[in-house]
Amino acid sequence: MKLTRTLTAALLASAALTGAAFAQQCETTLRSSDTHPEGYPTVVAVERMGEMVEERTDGRICIEVFHSAQLGEEKDTIEQTQFGVIDLNRVSMGPFNNIVEETQVVSLPYIFRSVEHMHNVMDGPIGDEILAAFEAHDLVGLAFYDGGSRSFYNSEKPIQSMEDLQGMKFRVMQSDIFVDMVSALGANATPMPYGEVYSSIQTGVIDGAENNWPSYDSSGHFEVAQYYTLDEHLIVPEVLVMAKSSWDSLSPEDQEIVRQAAKDSVPVMRELWAEREAESEQKVRDAGVEIIKDIDKTPFIEAMVPVYEKYVTSDKLKDLVERVQATE
Ligand code: GTR
């Protein structure tokens, strides 16, 4: 942990030097982390947000996006954002589950009936409550992005039903909910950083993983796991957070500009996401991936009862789940 922090600080320092031209007229440069490569919708959305912030502060505040996990894997970058070593971070809600309890609700399998349902929840008072919950953990929640729906892919066989999943090994994001979700389906889960998945499938350490179309494509996982079963077990929103210490160093006016620019980047992101989903689907289809769709999701949904029983125990989470389910 200490070593990773030192390394990140060194990386940031050298990047700040080489990026001197970029930072020239900026009094403050906020460094933002993302696991995805250049051109990915989340990366572009934060870059657009940066342009808005720069314009609205007359160039005083800039944002520099470090894509492709240059600052580390999600779980580590979250800790570093809590410490204020990284200013901004765009991550899935999954790796937050063990830190911010409220994020568990929107990470429950099949909690959202559709992407539209997810938008209605996250754009409303429940979304605001979840954003506010980050404050108690040295973070400021700024906005939610889309993460599509996640489905299983593997290198072994076309999975048509829950029976086909029995005993298989899947990588999941580093969150206990996902480990229990996979176990409840009769398979084995290995939580591991995103960057290790490709080689782990290739060398047979795991049979596959689960993700959305753009990540399945951009990570190259489709090259080593050519069976993709659209069971759509998760619709996990993504989140943009800021280090509380970086936030506190801004004036209230600048805080408002940053918050508003983050919100204004959401429609940009949604448009880019919709385009990218279609492009990625086409790309992996062209590459010869076998897509298994129209599967019966009912047994998958029913198998999740113990997962809900295990995680939705406090009154706070019960109430949140009920309100999510009651949202149109
Ligand atoms: C992607 C998500 C990333 C990361 C990754 C993963 O869909 O955008 O933030 O969480 O999945 O599986 O680790």
Image (cartoon, rainbow, N blue to C red):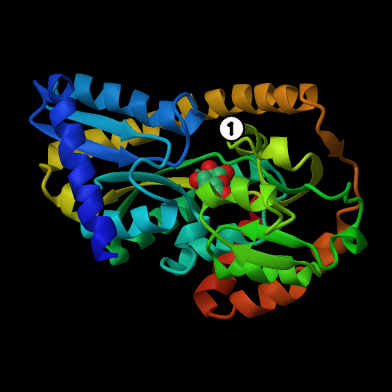
Which residue is painted at 28% across and 23% down in the image?
52
Residue 298: x and y in percent read 88, 59
Residue 313: x and y in percent read 58, 80
Q: Is residue 158 above or below residue 67?
A: below
Would residue 154 be visible to someone looking at this image? yes
Would residue 236 be visible to someone looking at this image? no
Q: Is residue 138 above or below residue 66?
A: below
The residue carrying mark 1 is 218
Residue 33: x and y in percent read 35, 41
Nearer to us in this view, 54 or 228: 228
Nearer to us in this view, 209 or 313: 209
The outermost residue toward the front is: 203
Residue type beneath disc 1: Ser
Q: Is residue 313 left or right of residue 166?
A: left
Q: Is residue 83 left or right of residue 298?
A: left
Q: Is residue 83 above or below residue 319?
A: above
Which residue is painted at 33% across and 45% down in the image?
71
